[in-house]
Amino acid sequence: MSGINKVILVGHLGKDPEVRHLEGGVTVASFPLATSETYNKDGKRVEQTEWHNIVLWRGLAEVASKYLQKGKLVYIEGKLRTRSFEDKEKVKKYVTEIVAENFTMLGRKSDFEQSPVTAALPQNTEPKIQDEFTIGPSDENGDLPF
């Protein structure tokens, strides 16, 4: 039986994705992701933040570059990879990254839109909460079709 290499993270982007286009038209995007835990120590609430290097390839990188921004909350599934390289002084360095296989944008839909929802509305009108959170088609009784 082979091993399992699976990483699941939910966190906030530390900066906008950095996008590069490699030879052959391959796109790669990378960004730091912060995950935080809280615990009590001596009666005080302590927050511990871990930073993860996220790498996305090809179409996933294109989507990330279009929709993800610093501070956004995302769910990421991927694999842990460690690679090595030589720095300018020819010293071998190692870096551990999460190679994302998929991601889901979390939060409200309006958090990921390019322009605010209210910009398209006439003045003196407020968006209805119902309009922002449409789940899917329903029948006349309001029941979902499944």
Image (cartoon, helix red, strand yellow):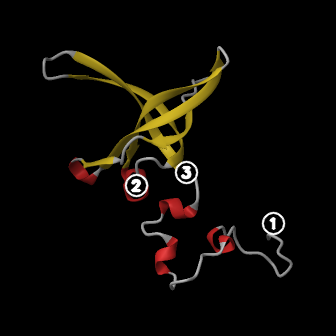
Q: Identify the disc placed on residue 104.
A: 3
Extreme-right residue of the structure? 141
Any part of residue 6 in sight: no
Please tell me which of labels 1 and 2 falls first in the chain: 2
Q: Where is 95 relative to 117, above or below?
A: above
Q: Identify the disc placed on residue 59.
A: 2
Which quarter of the figure is the C terminus placed in? Answer: bottom right
The residue that label 1 is drawn on is 146
- Camera-side residue: 88 or 82? 88
Please tell me which of labels 3 and 2 falls first in the chain: 2
Which quarter of the figure is the N terminus placed in? Answer: top right
Q: Secondary structure at mark 1?
A: loop
Q: Residue at x 32, y 20 (%)?
A: 94
Q: Are marks 3 and 1 in contact (CB under 8 Å)?
A: no
74 to the left or right of 81: right
Q: Where is 41 relative to 145, above or below?
A: above
> Hey, what amino acid is under mark 2?
Gly
